[in-house]
Amino acid sequence: MTDTLSNLFLGFTVALSPDVLLFAVVGCIIGTLVGMLPGVGPLAGISLLLPVTFGLNPTTAIVLLAGIYYGAMYGGSTTSILMRIPGEAASVMTCIDGYAMTQRGRGGPALAIAAIGSFIAGTVSVVGLMLLAPPLAAVALRFGPPEYFALLTLGLLVLAFLTGGSMPKSLAMAALGLFLGTIGIDLMSGFFRFQYGLIELGDGIGIVPVAVGLFGISEILLTAGQETPPQVQKPKLRDLPPSREELRAAMGPVGRGTVLGFLIGIVPGSAHVISSFVSYALERRLSRHPERFGKGAVEGVAGPESANNAAACGSFVPMLSLGVPSGPIPAVMLAALMVHGIAPGPLLMQQQPELFWGFIASMYVGNLVLLILNLPLVGLFVNLLRIPYAYLYPAILVFCVLGVYSVNNSVIDVWIMTVMGALGYVLRKFDFEVAPIVLGLVLSPMLETALRQSLAMSSGSYAIFIDRPIAVGMLAVAAALFLVSFLPALKRGAGWRRTIGLET
Amino acid sequence: MSHFRKFMWAVAAASMLLVPAAAPAQDAYPSRPITMIVPFPPGGVADQSGRPVAAALEKILKQPVVVTNRPGAGGAVGMAAAANAKPDGYTILMALSSISIIPEADKLFGRQPAYQMSQLAPVALVTADPTVLVVSADSPWKTVEDFVEDAKKRPGEISFSSSGVYGTLHMAMEMFAHAADIKLRHVPFSGGGPALTALLGNHVQALASGPGPVIPHIKAGKLRALASWGEKRLDALPDVPTFKELGYKDVEFYIWSGVFVPAGTPEPVMKVLRDAMRQVVEDPEFKSAMEKLQTPVVYMDAPEFQKFWDRDAAMLAAAVQRVGRIEEKKQ
């Protein structure tokens, strides 16, 4: 413990030295701006700006990248809340209740709560990262394909709690998402599936163009289709800070989201994106008024946003303590370290204490900088809504196209976004919820790969899921959850068709 | 109506931002910025060697060299984009060994190839790193001999991870397994990183990997290197024998990176680029960048590189053929 404290002191002397601090602030600002560009989330932001750091020393480079990362996460929630455009898969759930809050004139509080929730989640997770990294990392490595499959199965069950509308419609949308996720090269055999001669579809359909299309573009189309143009909002200063009730309602979700996100984040792989979905579903399930979700529930913003940030932080656990690239973003960060001649690995903490502890300390600093930066900016951002729709929407469309194109420099991605925009418009006209499509698309490739990798490991024997304690434990929880969700239906006998929405 | 008009004005105004500046007239090459396509995401091996090359080229050619990442389909998207670009020297490609695998795999599945190797002409080889066979430090195998003996006793039971089916790491392992006449169980992952994570977590028992990512784990005592695919031992791992030393004379494999241009690029342009690449590898900043990445620079000029590439491509083609179509095999 005293070791940790003295190390942390070392870290803060690094993080608070003027040049490092400057880079942390610059990173946060750049990140916020990048994150505001629709479609460009933290991963794209970091990847695009990675080359910029090549000329810096390793500590400032990693601090700058971490700043960009956090900044982009904060910035991404801004467009989700104000314009219903998710910067990445993880902010899809924020779009739903965040944007609903904006429409009710509570955009300012939604932004503030997202910022505060992210700050708390970020800070608490860094404490977790600092104190628990080595033991947790050892656990994280025990997550192989079978455990991963079990975890994702749990994620799939979350679908049932995701939306308040009709269950068959939600499941149909989830099935569509799962199907879209099967497009692309089959990882196990190298076979192209459903690519129709377009090699760009080889890596499958990107989540960002789908999310931006389904949420953002469809919203613009729906607004354009209204008989009378919507009133331009004139946010007042006193409406900016969240009310006491809103803050109180947010606290529980922030706490649960933080723990949940951190735990999911530690698992190597891309599973951290499901943390915001799981958190949303959890809050909706726990809420005494689940019907408020989707119509601007504070909990629906606070939970996912916190989970998302905590997961991001959790994913640094295996990266820093073992040097394994535990997800796409840590992989880019590791690459940045390698460019500077630092071999990331289990010895990083001992060999580069200044870098490690400087990085940890800069995460505290970065979170604080972002909170200070973002709370006053809430007023400025909310005022974007004053722009008449005739100017605002075309500008958003242009930025959507730019943002989606710039991620992979791919025109096909822009087309996917366009098609998904049209599809989202039609589906929403018919009262289908689009969030399950995104969750399906996120889950399906991971779930399939994990299942088939597990079977490759066991040479086709399903016993591998029973032999491994973590996997069998999680699958048992999943089975229990599945049964529990049917209990009320069974009890109520004949009325069950109505309760699950088959007859309304 | 006025709404619609306002909308159109705004669209027009916004799209003005997107119109690129008109290109200047053609002069002696290079007279305008050059695009370097990296067919992988930022931070990958190709990107890490591509960017220092681009930076050095910029100084030598006195024109900006812009790195554009065009990831997708294991590199096929970016390589096809380069293969079909105008052969004027303003589009160059930073590619990896996988450039020879993709057309072979396309052939295997009888699909329209994304590009043909003949559509690309090599300019210079930049790096070549032999792969290393690593196992967990807790495993019973101390030498390749132990490993092969055990694998022969229980065919198809020792598993290895790879960066993906037909990926470079898969091909390296396939070459060794073929030469040693053993059967291993293959668990593909998407990328070298997750493959390494699986080995560290003991979910698989072996991995062929580039030296960079595994050396820290070997030094930390988590992994053990049994052999390398190089022609000679690695400087960083002087105690690890090569497969050649151990009597597997055809087992040689490198993860290499090199610069290509679209075939049909005029000879004078080629000459400028080849001369420039010769200077790039001598550039001190470039050298120090590659040293930091622990990636040895192995330079070859176009004719030599072409020979190297032909041999490598033939070897890889044979390996792809041996693996065959996955789903046709009974596990």
Image (tube, helix red, strand yellow):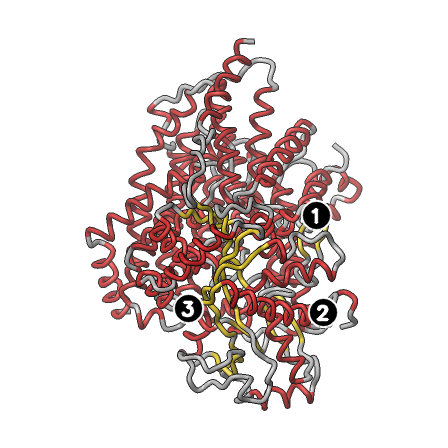
**x 31%, y 53%: residue:** A364
Q: Are marks 2 and 3 on the same chain?
A: yes
- Image quarter for residue B23? top left
**Where in the figure is residue A487, as x and y percent of width and height?**
70, 50
Residue A411, visible in the rendered structure: yes
The alpha-carbon separation of the residues under discs 3 and 1 comes to 38 Å
Quarter of the figure that contains the C terminus of chain A: top right
Q: Which residue is mark 1?
A: A195
Amino acid found under the numbered disc labelled 3: Val
Helix, strand or loop for disc 1: loop
Amino acid found under the numbered disc labelled 2: Gln
The mark lying in front, picked from 3 and 1, is 3
Of labels 2 and 3, earlier in sequence is 3
Chain to which the residue tagged by mark 1 belongs:
A
Instruction: Name the side, left or right, on which B150 lies relative to B139.
Output: right
**x 79%, y 71%: residue:** B330
Q: Which residue is mark 3?
A: B297
Helix, strand or loop for disc 3: strand
Q: Mark 2 touching mark 1, by CB under 8 A? A: no
**Where in the figure is residue B138, as x and y percent of width and height?**
51, 84
Q: Which disc is residue A336 wearing? A: none
**Where in the figure is residue B131, as x and y percent of width and height?**
52, 74
